[in-house]
Amino acid sequence: MTTAPNAFYAQSGGVTSVINASACGVIETARHHPGRIGTVYAGRNGILGALAEDLIDTSAEPAEAIAALRFTPAGAFGSCRYKLKSLEDSRREYERLIEVFRAHGIGYFFYNGGGDSADTCFKISQLSQAMGYPLAAIHVPKTIDNDLPLTDCCPGFGSVAKYVAVSTLEASLDLRSMAATSTKVFVIEVMGRHAGWIAAAGGLVAGHGIPVAVLFPEVAFDRERFLARVDALVRRHGCCTVVVSEGCRHADGGFLAEQGARDAFGHAQLGGAAPVVAQMVKEALGHKVHWAVADYLQRAARHVASRTDVEQAYAVGRHAVELALAGQNAVMAAIERTGDAPYAWQLASVPLAEVANAERTMPREFISEDGFGITEAAVRYLQPLIEGEDYPRYRQGLPVYATLKNTPVPKKLPAFTPG
């Protein structure tokens, strides 16, 4: 009797409020096919878990614990910011991954992450074929930046967009209440290194009567035009909210918020656009300004997650397993929009070769002509992604989130040091 191949699942990069819903989709679907998929192993701290042969046995978790992942934020198995380089530069590490997969009978690889993860997944599929090792490598999309190509949206984005829209609305109402004698400008900084999708979500409040100016990475920052816009809004409405993307750039390409440091993926370390903008407004216009950075709060806020986002996150996890069982390899589970009103979508698959290291920014037709707001086309795109609520269960006033046992799998290979 032939033993069914096992599966390996890992979470990569910055986590989201719904990445565990994708994990839930992968694991529950695999459990529905016991004759075709053996045990699902998870990597402790992402791909580093595979390199270190630090695997987690998800079969040790009862069904109710796996089901609870759907309502739990962050990464239940741990994630990492660790970028494997090219096959030529990191061949030793790629071969180590295949060695670990071989030792543990792994025939399915599900990598849950963004663009860099898509690239890694693609390279592993290439190497496994070159080495004659049978492996189905499927990418499970995840990124709050919403910048993966060939998918209508990225799981994780809808919930961040909802959080930013809600927080911008609520803070703006607070601002308006006190503007006559106190703060007149509130600046909120949101994530988005090169793409302004998250900042655009803050622009949704304009439809609720809130004076707002949005600063996108896709629009070169013009200090004088920006200050004139803020001043005009304050004069007309008594106050103004500014939503600034951390990736907002000057015309020369330099980030407003660049600190000179780099993260583990080699990206510029950002954070600090809000105080830069706030100080600019204070000095030039003399208005009292408050600022805030949404930071981890925006991506961890499972309590206000979008139902659409949760459903899509689970669905791509499920679909990834179905694609692997159908014999697909080197593809990403994708979301395809089939209607706007009412919103409708379906699942698809796209080649990883067309996803890896590609980036989708905001189309110009989604940004208003003056560069400080969003268009009706953007509203039509964004609105359904933030709709619906999917509240976790509460106990003693706090959400009840899953904590897994994360039982380790016995190691079979010599120790390995990445890098």
Image (cartoon, rainbow, N blue to C red):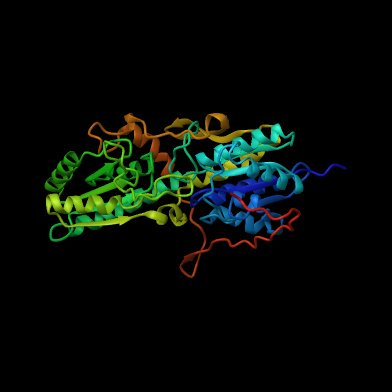
Is residue 296 toward the left or the right of residue 93 in the image? left
Rendered location of residue 195, percent (x, y): 38, 39
Instruction: Say whether residue 105 is left or right of residue 71.
Output: right
Nearer the observer, 392 or 39: 39
For the residue pair 152 and 351, the one nearer the viewer reads as: 351
Q: Residue at x 30, y 56 (%)?
A: 292
- Residue projecting furthest to the bottom: 396
In the depicted view, which residue is nearer to us: 96 or 32?
96
- What residue is at 52 percent from the left and 61 percent from the top? 393
Q: Is residue 323 visible?
A: no
Q: Quadrant of the N terminus?
A: top right
How far from the left and from the top, in percent, is residue 235?
11, 47
Residue 415 on image: x %, y %: 69, 55
Q: Position of residue 116 (x, y in %)?
A: 52, 40
**Is 125 situated left or right of 143 in this image?**
right
Dividing the picture into quadrants, the one containing residue 254 is top left
Residue 47 showing in the rendered view? yes
Tell me how many marks there are: 0
Q: Is residue 358 above or below residue 1?
A: above
